[in-house]
Amino acid sequence: MNEVLRTIEQRFSCRDYDGRPVDKETLQTIAKAALQSPSAMNLQPWRLLVIADKAMVDKLDCAAMDYMKSLPDKGLYNRIMERGGKVFYNAPVLYLILKDPAAGSNWTDVDCGIMTQNICLAAASLGLDSVIVAMAHLSFRGEDADELKAALKWPEGLEFGMGVLVGHGIIKKEPHEIDWGKVINY
């Protein structure tokens, strides 16, 4: 089996990190892989925000938890509390994919999904763990959303696309079982 297929096969969604920082060269290598993602008509309707300041990642985690706690339905908040009370699982790095609605693409969400997968596979190929974290958008729903966006230098007019946490996982687990019944052969 070649290295790419092995990386795909062995990657899993890690939800427990030791918090150690990731070196700048590795962060740049992952960012480069993200930027190499294909997009419809090569419009590249995204910006990539790399947050490698653990204190900021933790602040965003708290903002997401505070927002969930403020909701009338406490179901999601309680679920996260039962799993340790962290949305970002102590990860040291958060890659935020911001989508650009002004890019004029009908395929922005698909393009952001492709970039998301490139980040995950690049991280895995470099010996790091990752998890796709759509709940990262909750960090920017509360009353301090504008302040957080300003601190991150979030460009005006861009919207949340997806988040990917990256770091050194504490746990290792087997990838999910594949279900060949999901394949329809014609």
Image (tube, helix red, strand yellow):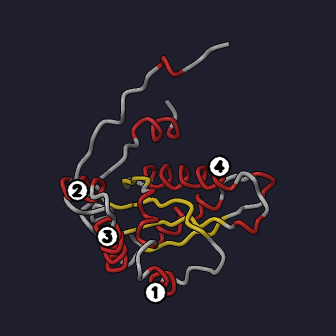
User: Quick one: SS at disc 2?
Assistant: helix
Relative horizontal placement of residue 69, taking residue 148 as reference (left or right): left
Tell me which amino acid carries mark 4.
Answer: Val
Number of the front mark, 2 or 4 = 2
Q: Earlier in the sequence, mark 4 or mark 1?
A: 4
Dot 1 crowding, Cα within 10 Å, few <14, some 14–19, many 20+: few
How far, Cα to Cα, is label 2 from label 1?
Answer: 26 Å
How far, Cα to Cα, is label 3 from label 2?
Answer: 12 Å
Dot 2 crowding, Cα within 10 Å, few <14, some 14–19, many 20+: few
Q: Relative to the observer, which residue lies in front, 4 or 104?
A: 104
- Residue designated by label 2: 78
Residue 21 in view here: no
Q: Residue reaching furthest front?
A: 72
Q: Is residue 186 above or below residue 75?
A: above
Tell me which amino acid carries mark 2.
Answer: Asn
Marks 3/2 in contact by CB < 8 Å: the verdict is no
Q: Is residue 23 above or below residue 130?
A: below
How far, Cα to Cα, is label 3 from label 1?
Answer: 18 Å
Percent x, y for residue 139? 41, 71
Task: Give the number of callouts.
Answer: 4
- Residue designated by label 1: 147
User: Quick one: SS at disc 3?
Assistant: helix
Number of the front mark, 4 or 1 = 1
Dot 3 crowding, Cα within 10 Å, few <14, some 14–19, many 20+: few
Q: Which mark is residue 103?
A: none
- Residue designated by label 3: 70
